[in-house]
């Protein structure tokens, strides 16, 4: 009995240490996997290609969301601010753009762009993976080429929904799951049906669905009491 007690006292700390080490390894691996989904700031130049306007179709996206002069909008996962610039021009001096990202390096890049292009109607916001930390009273939130990077889209979209005006809109633009284009690998892409399901859990209702050929889709959502889907 004494031997068993001594053995227990000797082995139990070792067992705990092993379990702790395994837990740390799992947590680190999960964190690394999560971080690997984010677009690397070192590759920002890839987002500035001369042909991006042709395939991204920013005017079509903003028209579908009703973004106009004087609108208050947010660009989630803004990266280096390519789409932010388009928003700033559309809403004009009477409007306001919140450029949000969860990576400090991206926020720095947007800040440099604001100064370089004299974008006086843009404010940067350092958000988190679950909460973009937007103020209330937003007319439209756009998530362009960033939804597939989200760790917890339902929680994030719940926080987005709270920031919207009663008739506010959310636009999700991402790459078709079939592949093609300059976007992520096929196994990292998200089907529109999955986006719609997550948005529904977050209290958002699909308003309209659009093709952005040749590579992308656009989903427009409103608060749960918004008008039904249009073809």
Image: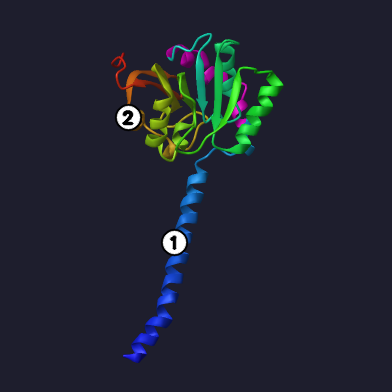
Pointer 2 or 1: first along the chain? 1
Horizontally, residue 210 falls left or right of residue 76, namely: left
Q: Which residue is mark 2?
A: 193
For this orientation, the residue located farthest to the right is 116
SS state under label 1: helix
| Span of residues in magenta | 46-64
Residue 209 lies in what quarter of the image? top left
Judge the density around disc 2: few (<14), some (14-19), many (≥20) Cα neighbours within 10 Å.
few
Query: Which residue is at a point 42% across and 67% down the rendered structure image?
Result: 19
Picture quadrant of residue 151: top left
Q: Residue furthest bottom?
A: 2
Q: Quadrant of residue 43 in the image?
A: top right
Q: Is residue 4 above or below residue 97?
A: below
Q: Position of residue 62 (x, y in %)?
A: 48, 14
Taking the image as shown, residue 104 lies to the left or right of residue 229, namely right
Residue 24 in the image, given as x and y percentages of width and height = 48, 60
Q: From where the camera sits, is residue 177 visible? A: no
Residue highlighted by disc 1: 23
- Secondary structure mostly seen in magenta is helix
**Residue 223 position (above or below residue 71):** below
Q: Quote the CA–CA distance across marks 2 and 1.
A: 34 Å
Q: Is residue 56 magenta?
A: yes
């Amino acid at each position: 009995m004494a031997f068993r007690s001594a053995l227990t006292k000797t082995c139990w700390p070792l067992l705990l240490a092993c379990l702790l080490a395994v837990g740390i390894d799992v947590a680190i691996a999960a964190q690394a996997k999560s971080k690997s989904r984010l677009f690397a700031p070192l590759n920002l130049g890839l987002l500035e290609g001369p042909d991006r306007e042709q395939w991204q179709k920013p005017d079509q996206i903003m028209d579908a969301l009703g973004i106009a002069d004087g609108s208050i909008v947010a660009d989630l996962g803004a990266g280096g601010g390519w789409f932010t610039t388009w928003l700033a021009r559309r809403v004009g001096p009477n409007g306001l753009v919140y450029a949000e990202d969860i990576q400090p390096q991206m926020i720095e890049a947007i800040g440099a762009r604001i100064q370089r292009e004299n974008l006086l109607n843009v404010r940067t916001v350092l958000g988190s993976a679950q909460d973009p930390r937007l103020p209330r009273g937003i007319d439209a939130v756009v998530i362009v080429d960033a939804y597939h990077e989200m760790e917890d889209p339902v929680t994030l979209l719940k926080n987005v929904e709270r920031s919207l005006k009663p008739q506010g809109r959310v636009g999700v633009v991402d790459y078709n799951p079939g592949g093609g284009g300059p976007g992520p690998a096929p196994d990292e892409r998200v089907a529109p049906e999955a986006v719609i399901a997550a948005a529904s859990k977050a209290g958002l209702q699909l308003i309209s669905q659009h093709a952005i050929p040749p590579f992308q889709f656009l989903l427009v959502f409103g608060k749960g009491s918004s008008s039904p889907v249009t073809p």
